[in-house]
Image (tube, helix red, strand yellow):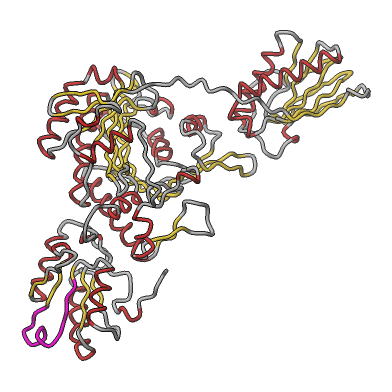
Amino acid sequence: MRMLLIHSDYLEFEAKEKTKIAEDTEILRGRMDECLSCFIAVEREDESNINGIVKKAVEEIEKVAEQLKVKNIVIYPYAHLSSDLSSPEVALKVLKSIEEKLKEKYSVLRAPFGWYKAFKLSCKGHPLSELSRKIVPEEEEEKKEEIESKFYLLKGEKLIEINKDNLDVIDNENLRLLAKYELGIKESSGKEPKHIKIIREKEICSYEEASDLGHFRWYPKGKLIRDLIADYVYDLVVKEGAMPVETPVMYDLNNKAIREHADKFGERQYRFRQGNKELMLRFAACFGQFMIKKDMYLLPKYLPLKLYELSTYSFRYEQSGELVGLKRLRAFTMPDMHTVCLDLKQAMEEFEKQFWMCLKTEKDLELDYYVIFRFTEDFFNEHKEWFLKIAKEYKDKYNKDLILEILPKRKHYWVGKVDIAVIDSLGRPIENPTVQIDVESSKRFNIKVHTNEGDIYPILLHCSPTGSIERVICALLERDMPLPYLPLWLSPIQVRVIPVSEKYNDYAENIVRELNKNNIRADLDDRDLRVGKKIREAGKDWIPYVAVVGEEEVKNNILTVTIREKSTLKRPYKVKMSLEELIKEVKEKTKDKPFRPLVLPYKLSIQPKFN
C-alpha cells in the first residue's frame, strides 16, 4: 500500500463521472476542515493479507493524527500512487475497512471509489504536513484449522484403519506404496524418474529452455501420442453423452466467482496485470464451463448435462523444486468433463457411472490402477452402503483392495471424490483419473436449474477420465517392464520393415506402402547399415513389429516378423506370416482405438533427428 498524508486546512471533492469499477454511493461530494487527508493506493501484494494491511494502515494513520492532534480524517482513493494496483474489489474492501476502524476514534469522510473526481485542498505547509508512506503488513499467522483425516483399507467387506505402524495389513505392494504416500511417508531415493531419460531418447518431448520452467516442446512422435490419447478421450466421453466445448485460457479476476474459485488454489497460479485488469491463466477448464452453464436456461429434462473440453493448456505455477518431468509441470493438457446433476441422488448415480468409465481406461491404456475414495465423514455415514456396493463390485471385477480417506468435515468444494493412481518406477503415485462431487460451485457461479417448484442450485461433477495427457504418457513410460513398449495403438511406428540388402528395398517399400494404406503406421529402414544394427535400433525405438525381408521372404511371399510384446531380453519372438496376416493382426489389436497416419517420412534415411 502507498499513502500520501497531508495535514490540510480543508479538502473538498465532487464526483464527476463513473468508471466501470465505480461503487454505488450517494456521497458524491463532500468537504472536511482541519483534517488529515489520506490519499491511498491499495497494491496487488496487499491481497494476500487484507486484515494485516488494514491493521497496519490504521495504525499509521492514527499515529500521524495523534502527532498532528487532528480528529478529522479524509480517506481518498488515489490510484496514481502505484503502478501495481490490487483488484478493484480488494481495494474497495480495504478502504471501507480502514474507514470503519477509524470511525471508532475519528470523524471520517471517504471519497467514492472508482469515480473521476475534482478536488481542492489547502496544505498547512509545516514540516509534518506532507508525509508519504509505504505500508507493508506483518506476516499474518496461519489460522488454518488442521483437519486430520483417517485412512482405511477396505479388505473384502472389512474396513481396517491404517497408520504408519500397520501398513503390513496391505497385501499389494503398490497399494501399500500409495497408502504410505497418503500418510505422509515420503521417501526420496535421490533418483530421477526413468521417463525423463526416455522422453529425450525416444524424441517424444523435452524442456523448452526459452520458456518458463515446466514447459515442454513436443516433437512429431510425442505430438502424435498426445493427439491419439486426446482422440481416445474425446470418443470415450462423447459416447457417454458429453458435449464438447472450448473456452478461454485467461480470466478476469475482477469477476467475483472467478476470483473466489481461483483463490482456493493459493499461489499455484499464473497471475498478471494488463492495464487496469488483473488476469489469470486457468488451472482447469471449470472456469469456462461454469460460465457457460451460468448463462444456460437449464431444465430438469436436460440433466444430467455433460460438457467436455480438452484444456490445451491449463497452467499451474508449481514450485521449481517440485517440477518433475511429465509428472508435475506448469503447462499441461487436461481432459475435463463437468456434469450438472439435479440433486445428490442423480449426482451419485452419475459418479458411479463415471468411476467405471475411468476404470475402463486402465485396460485401454494398459496401465495398472490403484484406487482411493475420499469422503467427508457426514457424507460417508449417510451413504456408506452405496460406497460399499461400489467397492464390492470393484473387488469382484478387479480383485484389488482399495483405500478410503474420511475427512472430519468438508474443507474443499467436494464432499466425495475418487482418485486413481499409477505407481511409478520410484514407488510414488502418479495421480491420473478422478471424479468429484462438487456441492459448492453452482451457487458461487450462479448456475441454476429451473424447476416447477422454483430455481435450485444443482450438484456438479468434475471428471477427468485419464488425468492429464502428459501424466498418461508419464505413467506409460514408468511401467516396470523387462522389455518396454507402448500400447500398439499409441506407438508412433507400429511396423518397421527391414530389407536385408539394398536389392530388396523396392519390395520392402511396396510392403510399407501397403501397410500405411491399411491405416498401419509403417516405415522402411533403407539405410546402408548391417541388418543386425537395424534390428537393434528397431528394438531401441520400441517398434512393436519388425518385419525382415530377404531372399526367402520374397520367394515365399512371407515376412519374418519379430513381435516385441511377446519377446524377452534374451529371446526375440519371431514368426512367419504373410502381409495379409500381419495387417489382420495389427488391425485386430487396435480395433476400436483411434488412428492417425504416420507423421514422419516413411524412409529412415531421410527422417530428421530432433535431439
Left or right of 348 on screen, residue 468: right
272 inside magenta stretch: no
Q: Residue furthest top?
A: 105
- For the record, the magenta segment spans 546-559
Q: Which of the image's four quarters has the C terminus?
A: bottom left
Lateral position of residue 209 relative to residue 520, left or right: right
In magenta segment, residue 554: yes
Residue that extends furthest to the right in the rendered view of this protein = 126
Q: Image point 50% across, 42% down: which residue?
A: 319
Quadrant where the N terminus is found in the figure: top right
Q: Position of residue 251 (x, y in %)?
A: 50, 41
Judge by depth and name the residue closer to the eye, 128 or 546: 546
Q: State the image coordinates of residue 481 (x, y, percent, origin top left).
A: 22, 56
Image x and y of residue 164, in percent: 30, 28
The correct choice, above or below, for 225 with respect to 297 in the image is: below
Picture residue at 35% right of the left edge, 80% below the top: 606
Looking at the image, residue 104 sits to the left or right of residue 31; the answer is left
Q: Nearer the viewer, residue 133 or 441?
A: 133
Above or below, 359 against 473 in this view is above
